[in-house]
Amino acid sequence: MSSRRSRSSRHSGGSRISEDQINDLVNKLQQLLPELRNRSSDKVSASRVLQDTCNYIKSLHREVDDLSDRLSELLESSDTTQAALIRSLLMQ
Amino acid sequence: MTTRSSIIRTRFAYRFLRSLRKLNQKEKTNSRRVKYAAYVSMASVVGSKRVWSRAVLSKIRNRSLNPNLVKKKKKKRRSSEESGFGELRKIVPGGQVMNFYNLLDETADYINCLTSQVQVMKNILNLLST
């Protein structure tokens, strides 16, 4: 455990991280979340931002799953025309 | 910022379409392979400068070699004051080895890339289904 800690602290480049820097990042994250984007940052707690971040990432993962399903179905069903289309897209 | 994400979208689209074409040529298309192709394409576009992209690439490589190995690693538990971040650590690739600051930074980048990935996949799907 302790060795893991020391390894991860190396990523910070040795410098101490201030609370302001953390807050800046939390605000930055908030701006990326559709549900919290338009709220002022002092009204949203950091833990709320983190929770919503998790939920948002999970929903994006589900979207990727769903899109992969649909793409593979489409490619399997009519392979020649789709393959030609993909090829033409790559030519652009 | 906008230019960076548009560059990423273009590069991702190119790589992803190329992988799809390869899968299609070998008649190996299935949902799981398409999904892997999407994540690998995005991670390759981002390259080695991010922890999350390195983690995605090595995770998928390891999984294809030995699926049991990856599962065991996941069991490690982290008891800390950061219980709220525990979930984020699990979701963001490579999150287990990051400090808190890096986790937030990598998460922001990961979200940007994932939204681009979803957008491009939607566009491709629309193009192919018309």
Image (spheres, grey):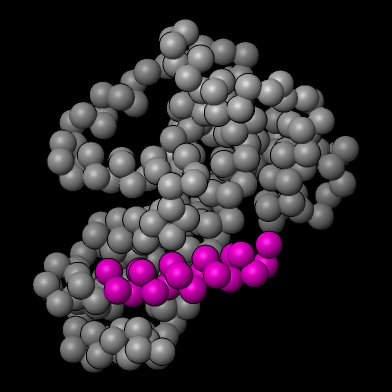
User: Residue farthest to the front?
Assistant: A14
Magenta-colored segment: predominant secondary structure? helix
Q: Position of residue A16 (x, y in %)?
A: 71, 21
Picture residue at 42% right of the left edge, 85% below the top? B127
Q: Which residues are magenta?
A: B1-19
Residue at the limit of the structure toward the left, as seen here: B26
- Asked if residue B3 can be seen in this view, the reply is yes
Left or right of B2 in this view: A88: left
Whole-percent x, y for residue B39 in the image: 37, 55
Instruction: Choose top left, top right, bottom left or bottom right for residue A19.
Output: top right
Q: Quadrant of the N terminus of chain B?
A: bottom right
Decide which of B15, B91 is in the foreground and name it.
B15
Magenta span contains residue B14: yes
Question: Which quadrant would the C terminus of chain B be assigned to in this image?
Answer: bottom left
Q: Viewer-proximal residue, A89 or A33?
A: A89
Q: Residue B101: image x %, image y %?
A: 64, 30
At 43% from the left and 60% from the top, the residue drawn is B45
Q: Is residue B116 magenta?
A: no
**Residue at x 28% of width, y 86% of height:** A87
- Taking the image as drawn, is residue A62 in sight? no
- Residue B38 in percent (x, y) is at 36, 61
- Specify the quadrant of the image occupied by residue B62: top left
| Left or right of residue B37, residue B14 in this image | right
Q: Is residue A72 above or below residue A22?
A: below
Q: Is residue A38 left or right of residue B18?
A: right
Number of callouts in the render?
Answer: 0
Q: Is residue B28 above or below residue B40?
A: below
Residue at figure coordinates x 30%, y 56% from the top left: B36
